[in-house]
Image (spheres, rainbow, N blue to C red):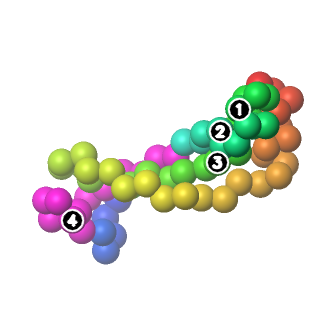
Amino acid sequence: MNQSKYICVKCGNMNYETDEFRATGGVFAKIFDIQNKKFTTLTCTRCKYTEIYKGTTSQLGNVFDFFTG
């Protein structure tokens, strides 16, 4: 739980949690199960409203994902 200048647009709460996930994008990535899209989430601790922000991935991380499946 973090406290910053964040204010939830739904309930006005000022506490949030962050997380991240990866997803595939494009035909090549889907065929080889390469998760080449990275997203960061910001979730209100009171009402659970979640915002998703697109992040950047490194080419090295994509290669590592390819070989580790």
Q: Is residue 8 magenta?
A: yes
Q: Amino acid at mark 1?
A: Lys
Where's residue 19, x and y in %?
47, 47
* Residue under pointer 3: 37
CB under 8 Å between discs 1 and 3 = no
Give the image quarter of residue 9: bottom left
Question: 1 and 52: which one is in front?
Answer: 52
Identify the secondary structure beneath mark 1.
Answer: helix
* Residue under pointer 2: 24
How far apart in space, not on screen, are marks 3 and 2 (Cα)?
6 Å
Question: 14 and 67: which one is in front?
Answer: 67
Q: Earlier in the sequence, mark 4 or mark 1?
A: 4
* Residue under pointer 1: 30
Quarter of the image with the C terminus in it: top right
CB under 8 Å between discs 3 and 2 = yes
Q: Which mark is residue 9?
A: 4
